[in-house]
Amino acid sequence: MKRGGRGQGAFEFIMLYLWAMIIVGVIGIVIFGSGLFGHGVTQEDVSKFTTVFPDDFAFYNTGTNSSVAWRQSGETRLANISLNYSGHCNATTSLGELRPGRSILDEFDCNTQCDTDEPIVVDIDLSYTTGTGRLINEFGVIKTRCSG
């Protein structure tokens, strides 16, 4: 037997199958992340809001008021805030004014049937008037789970 030739076969075996395991692992992660296994909403997600955004929220089935705490990130006072919730939650509300850096609580009956911990998606049309009198319309989405 030649010196140093004993481990070459084992080294080639490890290198060949290690690459195969890495490729299979990456493909598995991509498939799981794409939602192919139907894992639905796994965590809360808020998207598409710009100036006014939900700071905290809880959506309940019919009979218990749902709530969203709205925070303003702009630099001017906003007035005549109106909200139209759709998707898994159907409600229309209006709030007074919202000053910069402050938040306001919106409570409403969601008028929906959902089981506790069921994934839900709530679309929100939001409109308000800026301090200069300009009317702004925003649209956003909240993905979360029903609080029961």
Image (cartoon, grey):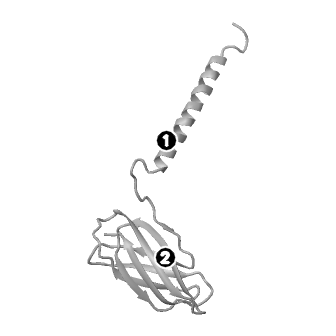
User: Which label is found at residue 80?
Assistant: none
User: Is residue 42 placed above or below 147 in the rendered structure?
Assistant: above
Q: Amino acid at mark 2?
A: Pro
- Residue 7 shows up from this direction: no
Tag 2's secondary structure? strand
Say which quadrant the C terminus sits in: bottom left
Residue 139 in the image: state x and y as whole percent: 49, 74
How many tags in the picture? 2
Residue located 45% across and 69% down the image: 142
User: Which label is found at residue 28?
Assistant: 1
User: Is residue 36 placed above or below 144 in the rendered structure?
Assistant: above
Residue 1 in the image: state x and y as whole percent: 69, 6
Q: Which residue is mark 2?
A: 54
Residue located 41% across and 83% down the image: 106
- Residue 2 shows up from this direction: yes
**In the figure, is residue 86 to the left or right of 17?**
left
Residue 141 in the image: state x and y as whole percent: 46, 69
- Name of the residue lying farthest toward the right: 3
Residue located 58% across and 85% down the image: 101
Question: Which quadrant of the structure image shows residue 84?
Answer: bottom left
